Image (tube, helix red, strand yellow):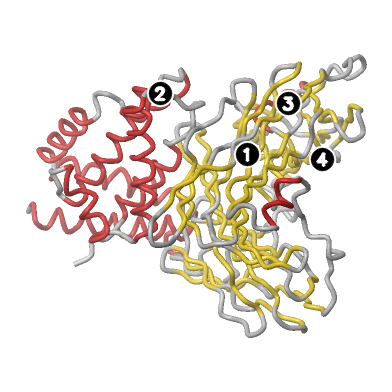
Amino acid sequence: MIRIGNIFIKTILALLFIAYSSLFSQTKINAKISDTKVGIGEMFTVSVTIDNSSARVLIDDIDGLMLRGTSQSVNMMYSSGTFKSIKTYNFTYIADREGKYIFDKITIKINNRTYISNPVEIEIIDSPTRNNDNYKPDSNKFDNFMNYADDIYVDNNINKKEVYLYEPVYINQKAYSHIPVTVLGFSKIPDRTDFISYSDSSDYNSFTEIIDGKRVSSIPLKREVLYPVKEGYKSISTYPFTFEKEGMFYDRVQYGEETFSINVIPLPDKEGFENFSGGVGNFVFSMKANKTNIAVGEELLITMEVLGEGNTSIITMPEINDNITNYFSVYQPKVYETNWFDNNKMIGKKTKEYILVAKSEGSFAISNINFCYFSPNDKTYTNIYSLPINLIIQGSKVNDSSFVNNNEKDISSISIRDTYLKEDKYFKILDIKIVYFYIIILTAVCIFIFNYKKINNIKFSFAKDNNDNRIDNIFKYYNSNNRKEYCKSVEDILLTALKNKFHIKDDNILYEKLNDYIDDEKAYEIKNIIDKCRFELYSGKSSDNEDYHTKSIELIKYIKELKIKK
């Protein structure tokens, strides 16, 4: 009986998993190209951004275009007890030959399914499109470097020396070299006490540039955006990087540390703009509803979205009309936020979702919803008003022509901007939510009856292993800037995940065994985080509360889902 019960449970769970993943799994993909026209010898980038999913992105070789490097970056957000991630895959090319080139086979593989993006095109011409004025450091030190006074030069570029409160300040660090070098990483973390900081480290891939007729190697090191939170004159130090020169004897040198002074000025008087959201930058604001014809008792989703260049984390989103409660029951709204680098700009998106339930018949308009921000370029406050949404509420279920359901369409290609991919296979017979409800109840009862002892053991084991609430503690230590306990907790949770997955007890052989089980890139990322934590612990040098846990959580998920090589 127990054997039959277990088989039944496993079968039901498998059907549920397939059905739910088919009906509700949805991944947002945004593919784009940095330029539409470049000259021979100029670089451009093809980027594919994927929400809430890891993927393999494949681009076929194209004769006439030279792939010079690839990189990945991940932005993660913690909201309502769950993590959301945005992963960007970048492919950097140099144009070798004139012509028009089409990227028509960008293949994205997600969860054993393959998607192909629609074509994107770039034109390569003989003359430079950037007026032959590619960025060149303007300093005597760089001129001396170009005359071979030194082997390595690190350029630290800051975009502004005077900014408004909360206005983004961008710092880009790039190395130039006459000889083969290896970038080992940065040696210390500068103080960022008076700033909110976001950064995106490079993979330290080397590119060849022609400057003043001379060939040099260039290595992107780091790009960072700082949002000042205090007024007055502030000092900003850049990251120092350690380089290893290749040769008979490996020579390690350090370059890159430089201090800049900026003046942070206050925002102008807000008189007449008391609804100021806190946003400083350039934004667009929109509001939409998933349907406009609804019946009493039906749910309605209202979505507000702020998108633009600026720090969205401090923005207060607008409220919906107060008198909407005459027609709807309004649930507590949910707010989501994501940030990512788009070329050399930090873009933020903040979304606020309201779920409403219609309770009275009639017509209602959601209007006069405005978002107020300060534009540093225009030096003024600006109000943006969303378009009105006219709602019709009837007393019985209506055919909603304003809401389009694409469930019947199999999608095999995606548009290049902001398109939702849906799974291309469905179990239509299970497309009844009440059936799922009863199946879940029956499944839970079966699991409880046939696996009572196992559930107790798992519960005990889970409680034992998680008494310290590791994730909660990591956030607590991070938010209180308790670096000692934070680093201990991050290192411990990573090592525990590895040991449990691969059944390794000895710390001394753990690193040696990593490459036996996982690929080199992931092994390097794991070692890098553990080494950083240990460096802080053993050196006693505290960072500016650098975030290790975001990447760690992603790696732990990767470790748990990994199939062990045999």
Quarter where residue 327 is shown? top right
**Which residue: 70% across, 60% down?**
417
**Which residue: 49% across, 52% down?**
183
The label nearer to you, 1 versus 2, is 2
**Which residue: 24% across, 46% down?**
498
Disc 4 versus disc 3: distance between alpha carbons?
48 Å
Q: Amino acid at mark 2?
A: Arg
Q: Is residue 298 above or below residue 234?
A: below
Q: Position of residue 386 (x, y in %)?
A: 84, 38
Mark 2 lies on residue: 483
| Contact? badges 3 and 1 (CB < 8 Å) | no
Q: Residues within 10 Å of mark 2 (few under 14, many from 20)?
A: many
Q: Position of residue 518 (x, y in %)?
A: 30, 59
- Element type where label 3 sits in the image: strand
Mark 3 lies on residue: 261
Closer to the chain start, of discs 1 and 2, is: 1
Closer to the chain start, of discs 2 and 4, is: 4
Q: Is residue 523 above or below residue 485?
A: below
Mark 1 lies on residue: 299
Q: Which mark is residue 417?
A: none
Q: Position of residue 206 (x, y in %)?
A: 56, 62
Disc 1 versus disc 4: distance between alpha carbons?
16 Å
Q: Amino acid at mark 4?
A: Ile
| Contact? badges 3 and 2 (CB < 8 Å) | no
